[in-house]
Amino acid sequence: MGVISLDGYMNDADGNFDWAEPSDDEHLFVNNLQRNLGAHIYGRKLYETMRVWQDIGPDDESAVMGDYGTIWRGVDKVVVSTTLGEVTTPRTELRRDLDPDWLAQYKEGIDGDITIGGPTLAAYAIRAGLVDDFHVFINPIIVGGGTRWLPDGYRADLKQTDEHRFDNGVVYVAYEARSA
């Protein structure tokens, strides 16, 4: 799943993504998308950003954020990193590489979908043909540079499977990969 600018970046040239903070309506939509996930696979930077959800509960934040914290804690997580010393959240495994054979086997053993997050890690999985669906939240902003959502040189025919428009101008679109 990608949260991107209109020009296809996950963050700006300085690494900021504060422009992508979701509205409560968007957050509830994401909660419902992820409610039945089987696992998250993260790169180091995204894991370090997301692990805050380990401590956010229903009494700490808004109801929708507390709900997401509950969802996040209930899903297995795999962090792929050569530099992270250890993971600090339960239900989390640390791997040093994302072996395509391991991932294919892992997908078979998971009940539910798997998200692969972090643009570098996702690019690797996309190029390896391991990504079946693309989910993107397109934000009404042009940032002019940063980390691209999709890897350069990748081409695939897609079939649109869903879309949703939010009052703040964000558009969610889901696609199934037909071929790469």
Image (cartoon, rainbow, N blue to C red):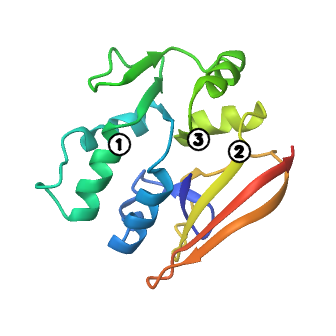
Label 1 and label 3: CA atoms lie apart by 14 Å
Against 105, residue 133 (above or below) is below
Tell me the number on the disc at residue 113: 3
Between discs 3 and 2, the one toward the N terminus: 3
- Image position of 1 (left or right of 58): right
Against 172, residue 166 (above or below) is below
Asked if the residue under mark 2 is in contact with the one under mark 3, i.e. CB atoms within 8 Å, the reply is no
Tell me the number on the disc at residue 151: 2
Front residue of this view, candidates 43 and 108: 108
Estimate how packed mark 3 is, as few (under 14), some (14 to 19) or many (20 or more) residues with alpha carbons within 10 Å.
some
How far across and how far down the image is residue 138, in percent?
57, 68
Under circle 2, the secondary element is loop
Question: Amino acid type of disc 1?
Answer: Trp
How far across and how far down the image is residue 43, in percent?
48, 32
Question: Amino acid type of disc 3?
Answer: Asp
Against 84, residue 128 (above or below) is below
Residue on which disc 1 sits: 72
Label 2 and label 1: CA atoms lie apart by 27 Å
Of the residues tagged 3 and 2, which is closer to the observer? 3
The residue at 44%/50% (across/down) is 35
